[in-house]
Structure formats: C-alpha cells, structure tokens
Image (spheres, grey):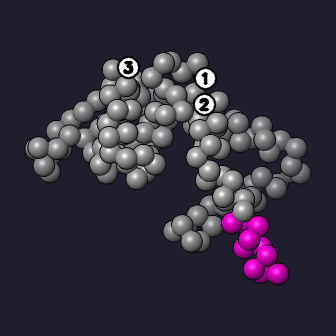
Amino acid sequence: MENEVGHQIADALGILLRRTTRAQLHQELTKGMGEAVDELTYPVLSALARSGPRSAADLASDAGVDRSGVTRRASRLEAAGLVRRETDPRDRRAQLLVLTEQGELAVTELRSRLAAHIMASLSSWPPGEAETFARHLRRFTSEGPFA
C-alpha cells in the first residue's frame, strides 16, 4: 500500500515536472505580458525573483537551462527593461543579473496570474481541501525528497 502511494505521487510529480507541462503553463501565464516575457524567459524571471541577484551560471540550474540559455534570455529581458546587469561586488570580473523595478512588477503580475490559475483549477474542490493540500504540499517540499 505505501509503495503504491509512492508510485502515485511519483507519477503525479512526473506530469508536473515535464518540460512540456511547464512550457504550456508559462505560455498561458505570459500572454499579453509583452514580447520579452514568454515561456522561455519566465523561468529566468521566476528564478531571479526567488534567489535575488545571481550570475547566469548560478541561475542556470534554477531556471532549468544552461548558462548560455540564461544569458540569451536575460539579454531579451534586459532590452525590455526587466533585468539589468551589475558588477558582482565579490568578484569585479563577474556580472550579476538583477530584476529592475519593472521586472519585479512583471513577476508580481505573473505570480498573481499563477495563483489565480491554481485557484480556478481548485474551485470545484470541497471547502477546506485546497488549504489542506497546500499545507501538505508545503510540508512535502520542505521535508520530503526535494528538501
């Protein structure tokens, strides 16, 4: 029985973690956000918002692309005024990617859209179930295999 639950959770996580699943969600969330914000740049914006200023190399694993992919996407975001590059105070040769105020506003909008999308998908759940799910998911991510 326990092993079956583990398989069920693993199967569900497999769907959530699929690149195509994420790309479709990011495409939907970024509609109308401007040409620089799309399913490709979303992970860079999101990772920067979670981690704060980082180099492209450090951001790559969080964004799910390699360093050159982060650099290309960051250049698009920089041209749109959402990201800027600053010299790393710990290593004057390195550059950090930093969200601008406009970038932070874009991330706030994207997070609001994501929260609304999630809540819409949970609207048919019985009262209290979404809160219980959120509490258990938070616990799973902080104490489970991804901690």
- Is residue 135 visible in the rendered image? The answer is no
Instruction: Please give the range of residues in magenta.
Output: 1-10
- In the displayed structure image, the side of residue 3 where residue 114 appears, left or right: left
What x and y, as percent, mark residue 26?
Answer: 59, 35
What x and y, as percent, mark residue 83?
Answer: 34, 30
Neighbour class for label 1 at 10 Å: few (<14), some, many (≥20)?
few
What x and y, as percent, mark residue 125?
Answer: 86, 49
Name the residue located 52 percent from the left edge and 28 percent from the top edge: 38
What x and y, as percent, mark residue 56?
Answer: 30, 43
Amino acid type for the residue under numbered disc 2: Gln
Q: Which mark is residue 55?
A: none
Q: Which mark is residue 80?
A: 3
Find the distance from the CA under tag 1 to the CA under tag 3.
16 Å
Q: Circle 2 is placed at which residue position?
A: 27
- In the displayed structure image, the side of residue 124 where residue 133 appears, left or right: left
Callout 1 secondary element: loop
Amino acid type for the residue under numbered disc 3: Ala
- In the displayed structure image, the side of residue 77 where residue 15 appears, left or right: right
Name the residue located 77 percent from the left edge and 52 percent from the top edge: 130
Discs 2, 3 touching: Cβ within 8 Å:
no
Callout 2 secondary element: helix
Callout 3 secondary element: loop
Q: Circle 1 is placed at which residue position?
A: 31
